[in-house]
Amino acid sequence: MSKEFTVGSKVRVVALPPYVKTAEPMPMLRPPDVIQIGEEGVVLDRRPGGYWGVRFTKGAFLMESQYIESVDASS
């Protein structure tokens, strides 16, 4: 079950994937240590395959919804 986010909303990394993809026309795989657990970013767009484009301090990356949560989520 995929979580939905609003474009422009803030999200937080809750788990690191084995690798991250850059959000470029030709995505590149990067090691997961370019982002940290707890780092916040802004949702740029929705991508095919269950990915979200998210802008972090070190760049924009494609993140699956299982690795991010809304900053204002009350769990």
Image: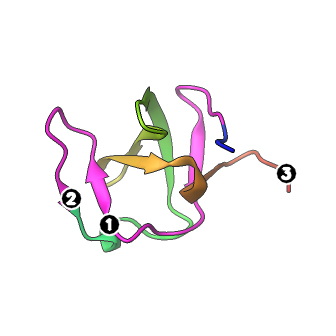
Query: Looking at the image, which is closer to me, 50 or 9?
Result: 50
11 in magenta? yes
**Helix or strand or loop: what does disc 2 sit on?**
strand
Image quarter in which the N terminus is found: top right
**Helix or strand or loop: what does disc 1 sit on?**
loop
Which circle marks residue 74 in the picture? 3
Q: Residue at x 62, y 33 (%)?
A: 5
**Helix or strand or loop: what does disc 3 sit on?**
loop
Nearest to viewer (mark 3 / mark 1)? 1
Q: Amino acid at mark 2?
A: Leu
Q: Amino acid at mark 3?
A: Ser
Query: Looking at the image, which is closer to me, 38 or 24?
Result: 24
In this orientation, does residue 35 appear? yes
Q: Locate residue 45: give its quadrant.
A: top left
Residue at the limit of the structure toward the right, as seen here: 75
Image quarter in which the C terminus is found: bottom right
